[in-house]
Amino acid sequence: MILLDTHTWIWAHSATKLLSDNVKRLIKKTQTDQRAIASISIWEFAMMVTKGHINVKIDPKRWLNDAIGNSGLRVIELTPEIAMESCNLPGSFHKDPADRIIVATARTHNLTLLTKDRKIIEYPHVQAVW
């Protein structure tokens, strides 16, 4: 199973050209029910829309329904185990709580994280690719 970082999920659903060829290939070859996002990504999406950082061409609730409900994408909920892991990541990792939860989700479920975020890619305690 693969875990899409928030931007990867948004870009993949929006069919932008911002995804790397490697990420496109990984998404394409992974069965739909083996693709996931962390639930915090939904919150990040909502915050980006609210703050005007991204624009979606349709109602954001409909966009979410299409991006999650109609796509077969799995949403991994924030559990006590993931919450604790996000506060106790090994080594040095930056303080962004959403990134910490996404990394903890990948670690807890032993998933490959698809992200363009250099800080995550360079973090040696999670399998992340772009």
Image (cartoon, grey):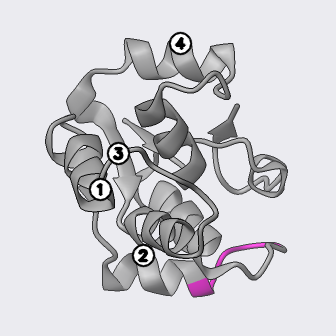
Of marks 4 and 1, the one in the foreground? 1
Q: Is residue 64 above or below residue 94?
A: above
Q: Secondary structure at mark 4?
A: helix
Amino acid type for the residue under numbered disc 3: Ala
| Residue at the spot of label 1 | 59
| Residue at the spot of label 2 | 82
Q: Secondary structure at mark 3?
A: strand
Q: Main secondary structure of the magenta part?
A: loop
The residue range painted magenta reads: 87-91
- N-terminal label among 1 and 2: 1
C-beta proximity under 8 Å, tags 4 and 1: no
- N-terminal label among 3 and 4: 4
| Residue at the spot of label 4 | 25
> Is 51 situated left or right of 117 in this image?
left
Q: CA distance from mark 3 to mark 4?
A: 16 Å
Q: Is residue 126 above or below residue 78?
A: above
Q: Is residue 59 above or below residue 74?
A: below
Residue 60: give x, y in percent of width and height.
33, 59
C-beta proximity under 8 Å, tags 3 and 1: no
Q: CA distance from mark 1 to mark 2?
A: 31 Å
Which residue lies at the image location 50% right of the left edge and 19% below the top edge? 26
- N-terminal label among 4 and 1: 4
| Residue at the spot of label 3 | 36
